[in-house]
Image (spheres, rainbow, N blue to C red):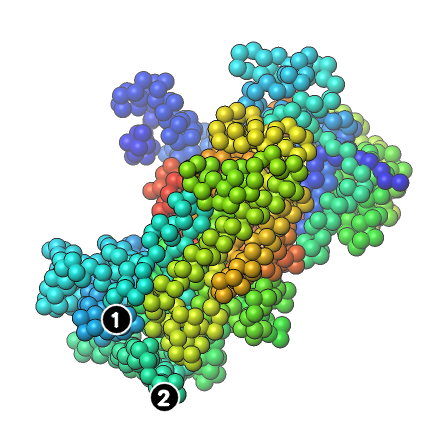
Amino acid sequence: MFEVLKYIHDHIGDTLNLTELADRFGYSKWHFCSKFHEYTGKSFVKYVRHYRLQLAAVDILSGKKVTDVATAYGYDTLGGFDKAFLAQYGCLPREYKRLEQQTKQYYERRKDTMYPLTDRCELLRQLVTSCNDYEDKYCIQRQVYSTLGRIHAAERGCTQMQIIGEGLCSILREFSPVIIPGELIVGFNHPDTKYEERFAPQDTPEHRALAKENGIREQVLEEYFQYQKDPSKELLFEYRKPLIDFAHTVSTPPTQQELDSTEDFSSIVRNIDSNHTVIGYEQVLRLGFRGLLERVEAFEAKNGENPMYATMKCICEAACQMGHKYAQAAKELKDAGSDAYQQKDLEQIIETCSRVPEHPATTFREAVQALWFAHIVNTWEDFINANSLGRLDQILYPYYKRDLEQGILTKEEAFELICCLWLKLYRNYDVQQSCVGGTAPDGSSDVNELSYMMLEATEQLNIIRCMSVRFSKNTEKEFIKRALEVVGHVQKGVPFFFNDDVMIPALMSKGISKEDAHDYTQIGCVETVIPGKSNPHAVTGEANVLKTLEYVFCNGHSMLHPDLFPGAETGCLSSFDTFEKFFTAVKAQMYHLLDLTCSKVKKYREYSVHRSPKPYKSLLTRGCLESGRDFNDAGAVYDYYQIMLDGIPNLADSLEVIREFVYKQKTYTLQELKDILQQNYPDERVRMEFMNKAAKFGNDIESVDSLATELIHTACDALDELSRKYELSFHAQPFTFWWMVDRGRETAATPDGRRSGEIIAYSVSPMQGRDFNGLTALLNSIAKLPTTRTPGTTSAIVEVDPKLFTDRNIPLLADILLGAAANGLENVQFNTIDADTLIDAKKYPEKYNNLAVRVSGFSQKFNLLSEELQDHIIGRTKHTCL
Amino acid sequence: MSVTALITNISRGSLHDGPGVRTVIYYKGCLLRCSWCHNPETLSPKKELLYHPSKCIHCGACVEICPAHHTVVGNDMVFSRDGCARCGSCAASCPSLALTVCGEELTTEELLAEIQKDRAYYEASSGGVTFSGGECLLQADSVAQAAAKCHDLGISTALESALFVPWENIQKVLPHIDLFYADLKLADAEKHRRFTGQSNGLILENLQKLSRCHHNIIVRIPVIPGVNDTEADFMGFGEILQSLGPGVRQVELLKYNFLAASKYEALEKPFSAFSDHTQSDAQMEALSSFLERICGIPCSF
């Protein structure tokens, strides 16, 4: 059929005849019709008409005469053309041009009030978005140098801390600078987000050529390949055995089975021992690595030597040289006089990089460059993943203000620099979060000129930029409206919104000081962090609380794997003669499940303390230098563990069904219900009944919303108690990431009408497609949850029709957001693609290469998602606010 | 004493039925039969059964409950409304929501409970509640009581009516309504009778009175292709609007809504579209500026 379409498109000006076309492609006429309809969703005639009119519209816009266009596309009379055009576009052809111009002018007018995107940024934007991760080719440097650094240190018999530090120092010392023509901010970081074998060079001609291009000497490469072939060095290649000690085993690693729980996947602990951070980059801006080195020495003098201080000193020394290497490279390029580079750009790179990151930044430009270098070092320590940047408008504002006052920077130049930084951060999968806005401890708004400018850079560049907005009831409404405009115009689900009035009390309830709580920001998707002062251990522990139902029904056993016994014994079904007793059993299972999760976190923690010290993160995290303890060894001022809770909405919906049908109407006994679930709904009628005839979370219906609320309270209570039991701080985080697909696959049928293996709800968003009482009702349901107890954020994605983001409606949407915030909403992310577009995009991915959607705390190109996730996103209720 | 009203639907988070974010209450029952009505489910003053064939899973639960009025032929459900007692038991038994009852009896307290759920949004946006329908003023006691309570709670109120009701009904609600949307459909009495089933005498009389005793009225004119969109029609509207009292603040033209077909299908009533598309902005702009010139009241669409 693809060929057929291609033929139609190529011959659109000719007379197209269905019979002839069917013949040409070897179909019978009728078969052709049905195939065509199936593939395109339209009949042959409609499709051709639609496509012709599209082309006609383009011609009209280009200034051709309406009569000529009508004839060109086979309309005998102007009246017929007018009629067809009106039906498709809602206006007459001659009006079309004017209307189109109006909209365009309107957008242009808006653009006039914004900072212009410079040619430089436009060209760089084309470069970074045209290929998948254009920095791929440089990453070979990190792989080779850091691996060799680690191996050499291990051979010298160094400690684990030093081995890891040497890996980092080695790349810092050895890398070859890369300056791309047109760049204002220089430096490449790791190309992707995690350990991946494809980035590790193999002994192939291509990789050898690549290594040569990257300036890696033959001798070094030979050494690398030699070690790669040596089984005894295997452990030092990160991508192979990320779980194993690099040096020597100081404690027994937990087995994968122990980590994955009991194969039932209800309690999961991940080996992410960091790469989810916001550390104190502003210290690099303020002190420079030279100044940081002096700080380390001061603490060393005070507390005595230890391997951590020694490693930090090496890193500071090596990092000081980063800038100089770039200055030198720029100087060589300048002297070579190549016309690919503008002399002025190179001069500025020389000037900037001669200073930072070794010395404190003195200008806005130096600050942006120093921040980027500080970030590179962080991602070179343990890859990008969700290593994030924090409150960029706050960090950079003092430099911006000073430069403006001194008259050495214009606002346009500042905007261009921000765009350059944004483009440096661009990734297809991006969870390098940054944050704008916020509230100061005295209640005043933290919004400044840079906050607006950063929103604008996101809008003008029109790229996925993982970005959030913090707001409170004191935030300027203008700012919230501006942020919503960006959501509406960029249509990539950014930025997302965090309510300070809920987040800050939630953080303070966990013992975080008022001052620090007001400085919170986000990592990656939606994990909360106190920048430069905390190790949040994000996404380490995860509990699929929906599985507690299986354990109650099977008295501790898994329903999917009856031989497994992951739950607690809560008694036989006949003992639950009231709903309260049943609910109590669920709560007991939940405690048991969380206990299991926390105990595994504890066990894993002890291991990771030895396995993966993080000297660079320790350097830039308050508490580590002072205590002499590593970032992963509770060195940070705030050391806590975020425990993800999956399936809360499904569990609440299921309990409501049980209360309604088993205890109120007594239509089914618990045993009958168990049989139904075990047999995965043999009778569709029953499934429909459960789905449609009991209230569902997300519709502002008290009975079921209060169940969801109580479930989260139960989890929070349990985590408080477990925090005491294990002497670790556990924060509830009702957030699923995109694992709702996997968790669903591992969960038996549930009473809310969900079949076995089907996806579960995203975070605390209602189960997709089950909210039908409108946007305000949905937001109210979510806002009712005990959000002030969950500083890990109750994440929710709301699907909104993009047509809603009109200039008339944006102030109203801001009001809705503020109204929901007043009710206690904690976090919300908007997705703004209509369902038709998504369905079309699933069918014809080639048409939608830049279409990005909100997946789960981050945006992603729709084409790169799995089919299951695509369907999940299509299935979410689209709110139109009619 | 609390009044009970028959409600079609309560729609929350509306952005188009008055200022700010609003909860719209659709009362059931209307005496006009406008041929273009896009809320046909609100016309009958009784509960009605809606049938959505696409949702039907052919389980037969409805037949078991009500064998008299349903027959099964093969796999297809043939559904008949003859002799339906509107008891709703079939809808109650339908697991897939293919059969639903349209119309719910709600007391003023119940209405208020629903209205109050979105208070935070009204406060943030200067929104409130809008009474609509059907013809909400056929159940004026409920509207008056609910609106009065809204005012006690500081919630702003708006009302949309076609004014084809006794004047006493309008009087009952007047003190409690902040914004009045009055519908005007056709200026010519004969045409009005032809397309809505009733003459417009009473409507115009009420509109005259209303424009002299309420200060905040917006007149709404649904523009229907081929029915009321000629120059002559708009001259007629202009004359009427010109003669009204000082309370009319604005005139809003509404584009033709041609998407109601599925609602008619659910009621199994014939639907005749006046056009398969809506008007363009330019067409609306032309009509609205024309009308504004004759009547001197600001017009928008």
Give the amino acid at mark 2.
Ala
Expressed as whole percent of the image width and height from the top left, the position of residue B84 reads 72, 17
Q: Which of marks 1 and 2 is nearer the N terminus?
A: 1
Q: Which residue is drawn at 67% across and 18% down?
A: B65
> Would residue A148 be found to the left or right of residue A438 on screen?
left
Residue closest to the eye, A570 or A879:
A570
Q: Is residue A394 left or right of residue B227?
A: left
Q: Position of residue A122 (x, y in %)?
A: 35, 61
Q: Which residue is drawn at 42% across and 79% down?
A: A627
Position of residue A288 in the picture relative to residue A115 (left or right)? left
Residue A331, quarter of the rendered image: bottom left
Badge 2 crowding class, 10 Å Cα cut-off, few under 14, some 14 to 19, many 20 or more, is few
Q: Residue A858 in the image: state x and y as whole percent.
A: 44, 54
Q: Is residue A706 above or below residue A106?
A: above
Amino acid type at circle 1 is Ile
A300 vs A867: above or below: below
Q: How crowded is mark 1: few (under 14 residues within 10 Å), some or many (20 or more)?
A: many
Chain designation of label 1? A
User: Which residue is more in the foreground, A679 or A685?
Assistant: A679
| Side (left or right) of B294 relative to A684 | right
Q: Can residue B180 be seen in this view?
A: yes
- Residue A163, disc: 1
Query: In which quadrant of the rendered view does residue A498 lie?
Result: bottom right
Q: In this view, does B290 lie above or below A213?
A: above
Q: Mark 2 points at which residue?
A: A301
Q: What's the chain of the residue with tag 2?
A: A
Quadrant that contains the N terminus of chain A: top left
Name the residue rendered at 73%, 22% in the picture: B86
Cα separation, mark 1 vs mark 2, equals: 23 Å
Q: Which of B100 and A527 is in front in this view?
A: A527
Q: Residue shown at 50%/42% (left/top)?
A: A556
Quarter of the image where the C terminus of chain A is located: top right
